[in-house]
Image: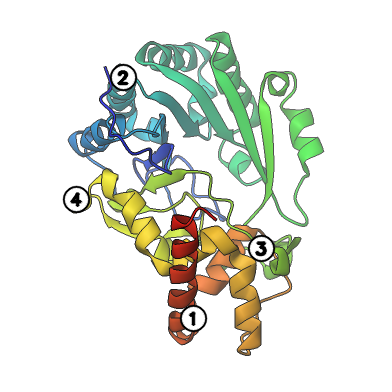
Amino acid sequence: MRKALSTKSVISKIAIAMTDKCSASCEMCCFKCSPEGKNTLSTDFMKDVILQASKINGIQSIGFTGGDPFMVFDQLLECSAYAHSLGLRVSVNTNGFWGKNEKRAFELVGKLKEAGVESMSFSADHIHQEYVPIADLKMAMRAVTAHNMLLDVTIMETSTSENIVRMTEALRPEIYQSSIANHPMLPAGNALEKVKEGEFIRYFASKAAYCPFFGMASLNFDGNYYMCCSQFCREIPPLNLGSAHEVKLADLDRRISSNDYLYVMLRRGLSWYVDLAGQLGYEIPQYLCSPCHCCYYVFRNEKLLDEIKETVKNEAGRLRVSHLLGN
């Protein structure tokens, strides 16, 4: 039985990037994962974080990602079963490379189902499919639905890639039982070096920027906690909440709320920063790839952050007082 702390956390889910090992070496991978990845969190370390999560009121689920967690399947299985035993919902993100053999695919998914995994998310696009044939991905998806697990597919696009219509056509009929998310490729990690600038779809108006934070904090394979699971999170210093070897999970709420930059961002939106930067002569592109891309532009600029430090501090103080007064 879960023993919850009295105060409800703003964090509802923890995403654990178990490893930077992956079957693929995608040119757009935000964390530069590959088969040569050397960073993998220990099982005991992850189980300690999961135990902490189970004791916090508000945290309801654990998501395992990477790299690809199937590259460390025994750890994935043990940690999934442990999280499930503590009353947490469990999901897994993968590229489906393990779907090459039907018998093996059904066996792996069956074990995860028994361990308590409820849903699985697949990354599918023209770049992932350079490493994972469509037939293998479809077999992996088939194994998931056959075990009555929830299924979703995330498709990333560039300006010249096969669009979502072609990808969903290729994944029929397995795609019919899944939820689909479609996003533009982001200029982070490998993509900064290997993808041409013209490939990025810049559709998001920075003047209307907001933070889409929805309560998912992440534990990266580097051992650090981040406020979110954005592809840019490791490149934005204010989002680093500290080493999980030193910081307790219960302290993340306080670290988020006590950081003036984050406090103002969550309550006034990124557009507040974009407007302020413009007033001070800093140029933020009119259109970016996503809200997270805008966050990257604002919070990686150390000169800007230093110049607006007092303004942000004063605004954070005003907002905290207003919150205490119930406004």
Residue 243 horizontal side relative to residue 163, left or right: left
Q: Pointer 4 and pointer 3: residues touching (CB < 8 Å)?
A: no
| Residue 120 x/y as whole percent | 52, 26
Residue beneath disc 4: 245
Going from the N terminus, do you reach mark 4 or mark 3 first?
Answer: 3
Q: CA distance from mark 2 to mark 4?
A: 23 Å
Q: Residues within 10 Å of mark 3 (few under 14, many from 20)?
A: many
The three-letter amino acid code for the residue at tag 4 is His
Q: CA distance from mark 4 to mark 3?
A: 33 Å
- Relative to 90, is 247 above or below? below
- Mark 4 lies on a secondary structure that is loop
The three-letter amino acid code for the residue at tag 2 is Ala
Going from the N terminus, do you reach mark 1 or mark 3 first?
Answer: 3
Compare residues 37 and 75 and report the one nearer the observer: 75
- Quarter of the figure with residue 276: bottom right
- Mark 1 lies on a secondary structure that is helix
- Relative to 114, is 167 above or below? below
Residue beneath disc 3: 209
Can residue 37 be seen at all in this image of the molecule?
no
Going from the N terminus, do you reach mark 2 or mark 4 first?
Answer: 2
The three-letter amino acid code for the residue at tag 1 is Thr
Q: Nearer the viewer, mark 2 or mark 1?
A: 1
Q: Residues within 10 Å of mark 1 (few under 14, many from 20)?
A: few
Q: CA distance from mark 1 to mark 3?
A: 19 Å
Q: Looking at the image, which residue is at 57% across and 32% down?
A: 122
- Quarter of the figure with residue 297: bottom right
Q: Looking at the image, which residue is at 32% across and 48% down?
A: 221
| Residue 170 x/y as whole percent | 75, 29
Mark seen at residue 311? 1
